[in-house]
Image (cartoon, coloured by chain):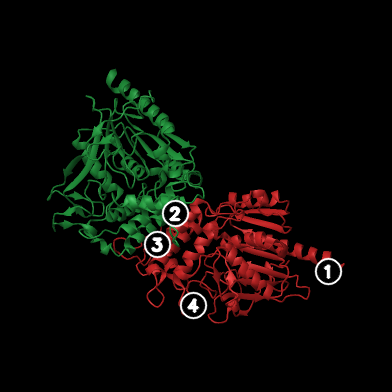
Chain colours: A green, B red
Amino acid sequence: METTNEGNAGIISTQYFTFAQPPDEMKLENGETLGPVTLAYETYGNLNKERSNAILIVHALSGDAHVAGINRENGDPGWWNTMVGPGKAFDTGKYFVVCSNVIGGCRGSTGPSSINPKTGRNYGLNFPLITIGDMVNAQKRLIDYLGIKKLLTVAGGSMGGMQVLQWMVSYPEMIRSAMPIAITLKHSPQQIAFNEVGRQAIIADPNWKQGDYYGGPPPVTGLALARMVGHITYMSDQSMEEKFGRRFRSERVKNKFAQDFEVEGYLQNRGTHFVKRFDANSYLYVTKAMDFFDASNGKPLAETFKGLKAKVMVIAFKSDWLYPAYQSREIVRACKMAGLEVTYCEVDSTYGHDAFLLETEELTHLIGYFLEKLFRGEVTAEYEI
Amino acid sequence: METTNEGNAGIISTQYFTFAQPPDEMKLENGETLGPVTLAYETYGNLNKERSNAILIVHALSGDAHVAGINRENGDPGWWNTMVGPGKAFDTGKYFVVCSNVIGGCRGSTGPSSINPKTGRNYGLNFPLITIGDMVNAQKRLIDYLGIKKLLTVAGGSMGGMQVLQWMVSYPEMIRSAMPIAITLKHSPQQIAFNEVGRQAIIADPNWKQGDYYGGPPPVTGLALARMVGHITYMSDQSMEEKFGRRFRSERVKNKFAQDFEVEGYLQNRGTHFVKRFDANSYLYVTKAMDFFDASNGKPLAETFKGLKAKVMVIAFKSDWLYPAYQSREIVRACKMAGLEVTYCEVDSTYGHDAFLLETEELTHLIGYFLEKLFRGEVTAEYEI
């Protein structure tokens, strides 16, 4: 495997797949329907003639379909550009990589900021409550549409990991392997609590107006606060210490309760930046979907992945306190109890939860070799003989 | 030591000590002045004729002078009633216990909600920025006023621990021992970050009005949000799991983004309760004082407690992730480097930061024996021979 050849996935345009046109609307897990549904997605590399080299990458809370390369419209690099491209871990010279956005979001897919065809206005809170299951059901439609019968792997970190677990549960026959990274089978009360603080910050913003703010000023103050809380949980105590220490800001304003410390300025900047690209209602819907997610869905742990044959690689990071390693070990237990072949990697990183985006070298080795071995095995067993 | 005799400290009235009447105002660490200054305090037990049995207890961010017994006005038990009383760890049958409120607060002492004598209106943001050092300088005036030359001990957890460390630095000759509990020599960027989120939530509340909200509706939504964030950090992942799990609320409202989970309802209740007894501006001032606190004040660790002779007991709790045990071990290191006699106790609790209020049995033994031994030694060495 050449990890040194870090080629770029090129100039990429986001694509859009629309389905569930009324009256054939998509049935949601809560019984309501949604349609039409658009999913934003991007693809990289080529599907081989056996259609055996397709990989689905799914993203975290604030991510989008633009996982790699340079966006044609705005020049932005992909959120996992270090990991996806020619010669990289998800080698687009070998694999056909698909990255799908989620419904409920605001990055090109149908969500609360979309126009409700029944009213001609933005959905707002008329958008139905969606689940991780719904997100994955929509992605399954996309994979069908792309002519893929079986995915070589489905991989994702954080909320992406929830989608991976959901694929393992909902479509076991469609995946040859799975990589849930830095995630849990279900949120702990602490994880729910952090999300709830973010939601309450949005709801408390007078501009939120029960979600009906489109056309007026959006609740950016509340959303920025939610993002600030998020960023604290994404870093480790140690990585914050290394990045900021107790240094004061250089552009320090001598006002009472201005941001005195660098870490305060950083959080404010992250918040201010985030509100330019994310919708507050989507933040509410998507975090609620995360909180309600339960891979076992009430079943015993041993039955969670019953019937699945995929090879699984579970990855956790030692300093990740938002999704602590013990939660990943619980995923491993569930896999073992279902008789699965499962590899567990606990990466010794200091980056906290952000490690899944930052520990490129370690992840490149883990994921690159896993895929190469799997893909080689696959070709040998079913196609070459 | 009788730990079974858990007598109550009785019916207690808060007392008020006012000093620094203009023009003899109190000089603050930032060079500004403040006066008159009132400190709310309570006392329990009797000062012996040698004046050798006085203990000062100092409180956390949201605490007050009412540490023990039943408040005469409202019937509330003290915040450390399990620890302070006849036969308890801080045995009011033996010791004269003083608990002092802090300046900058809102529980009877001078703070931003007090009337500014220069304007006849509430200070609001005209209140000067105060420090932990200023809080302790005011307490020193109270201790002088009570006729106490030397304290048997000064003890406190969380922000109380900061005041203890400040006493060790500012008035080493006035303390025979010190007990900093669940605290740090200085805030890490993570600790600053959590406080900053709380402050920004208050500042974002339209009712805050640059701190000039007295007489109008106070910024209760922002303050409640700040408290919610606080409560997450006060509990451990495990204690939240044990207390709430993923249970739904019984009185669940079927609204989108209502509180579905018990943990969400708990946080909301804590927030709603808190705003009835705490002033948002005090939250800003006091958390800023905590963030700026640095016991070493720029000096090397070895010189932090130079010249101090007190015996020190440092207590930390294993599951406390807000003030992790490594920070307490740093206090121990600083003590050792200054040649102090220091005891370090890392209590194996699952309660998180709240453990300093909840681990009564363990703390009773640790503190009770420490004080008894110290007090007996004291009497033998200086008074009986």
Dots 1, 3 in contact, CB < 8 A: no
Q: Chain of mark 4?
A: B
Q: Which mark is residue B383?
A: 1
Dots 1, 2 in contact, CB < 8 A: no
Quadrant where the N terminus of chain B is found in the figure: bottom right
Q: Which residue corresponds to mark 2?
A: A252
Q: Residues within 10 Å of mark 1 (few under 14, many from 20)?
A: few
Residue A369 location (% of width, % of height) = 39, 27
Badge 4 and badge 2 both on one subunit: no
Badge 1 and badge 3 both on one subunit: yes
Q: Nearer the viewer, residue B164 or B252?
A: B164
Horizontal side of residue B122 vs A24, given as left or right:
right
Image vertical order of residue B336 relative to residue A54, above or below: below
Q: Residues within 10 Å of mark 3 (few under 14, many from 20)?
A: many
Q: Which residue corresponds to mark 4?
A: B118
CA gap, disc 1 and disc 2: 55 Å
Q: Nearer the viewer, residue A130 or B115?
A: B115
- Seen as rendered, the residue at the extreme left is A23
